[in-house]
């Protein structure tokens, strides 16, 4: 079982136990017991805390392994300088950004790049990596997050959203790197 599947399972379990915690709280309330004195509630609360810790450690382990692997195997790594705070204000994006703990991942990449003498090139957050056709360079307009793949209106090349964007980020990063 890979890390992602494991984390997803842990998160599902966590949500289930959180619902149980809420039920315990309601039961105590119905019986007129203060939450501090509600044994079942307190026991469940500790269980939820341990699960939170587990999910967090699991995610951190995964980000460590992934960042080390990327840094060891590549000399130049191009990433988007995403405006995480701005994105977190956007509800649709908040989930996907917090899921991958993007800023934690980038900081791991950055200090490991220093350790191993590798280069990180940050691309401007305004660079439209998701809109440009990596095949012909045509800027095809905004693509909402639901659109996972699209076809260029000029050269008719069919793109996977993320793969196309990563190809653009790489090309832009190499261009920026060469200019510096
Ligand atoms: Zn095209």
Image: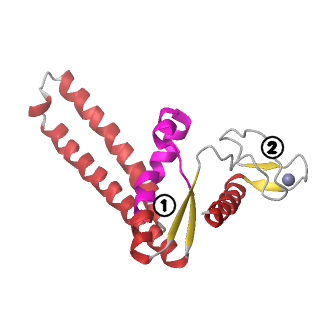
Q: Secondary structure at mark 2?
A: loop
Residue 140, numbered circle: 2
Q: Secondary structure at mark 1?
A: helix
Per the model, the C-alpha gap separating discs 1 and 2 is 32 Å
81 is within the stretch colored magenta: yes
Q: Main secondary structure of the magenta part?
A: helix
The residue pinned by badge 1 equals 4
State whether residue 29 is above or below residue 140.
Answer: above
Q: Quadrant of residue 28?
A: top left
Q: Residue at x 38, y 50 (%)?
A: 13
**Nearer-the-camera pick, 145 or 32:** 145
Whole-percent x, y for residue 21 in the image: 27, 38
Q: Residue at x 51, y 38 (%)?
A: 87
**Nearer-the-camera pick, 111 or 69:** 111
Residue 101 visible in the current orientation:
no
Local packing at callout 1 (Cα closer than 10 Å; few below 14, some 14-19, many 20+) is: few
Q: Can you say which quadrant of the picture contains the C terminus?
A: bottom right
Q: Which residues are magenta?
A: 80-108
Q: Is tag 1's residue or tag 2's residue first in the polypeptide sequence?
A: 1
Q: Residue at x 45, y 70 (%)?
A: 113
Q: Relative to residue 160, is residue 17 drawn left or right?
A: left
Q: Residue at x 43, y 63 (%)?
A: 110
Q: Quadrant of residue 114?
A: bottom left
Q: Relative to residue 104, is residue 54 drawn left or right?
A: left
Disc 2 within 8 angstroms of ligand 1 (CB): yes
Whole-percent x, y for residue 108 in the image: 40, 63
């Amino acid at each position: 079982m890979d890390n992602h599947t494991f984390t997803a399972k842990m998160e599902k379990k966590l949500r289930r136990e959180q619902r149980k915690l809420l039920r315990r709280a309601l039961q105590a309330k119905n019986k007129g017991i203060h939450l501090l004195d509600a044994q079942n509630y307190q026991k469940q609360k500790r269980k939820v805390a341990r699960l939170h810790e587990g999910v967090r450690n699991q995610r951190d382990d995964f980000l460590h392994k992934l960042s080390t692997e990327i840094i060891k195997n590549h000399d130049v790594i191009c990433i988007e300088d995403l405006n995480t705070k701005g994105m977190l204000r956007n509800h649709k994006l908040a989930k996907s950004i917090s899921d991958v703990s993007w800023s934690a991942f980038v900081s791991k990449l950055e200090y490991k790049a220093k350790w191993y003498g590798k280069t990180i090139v940050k691309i401007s957050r305004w660079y439209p990596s998701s809109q440009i056709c990596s095949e012909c360079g045509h800027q095809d307009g905004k693509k909402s997050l639901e659109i996972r793949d699209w076809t260029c209106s000029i050269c008719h090349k069919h793109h996977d959203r993320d793969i196309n964007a990563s190809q653009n980020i790489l090309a832009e990063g190499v261009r920026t790197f060469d200019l510096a």
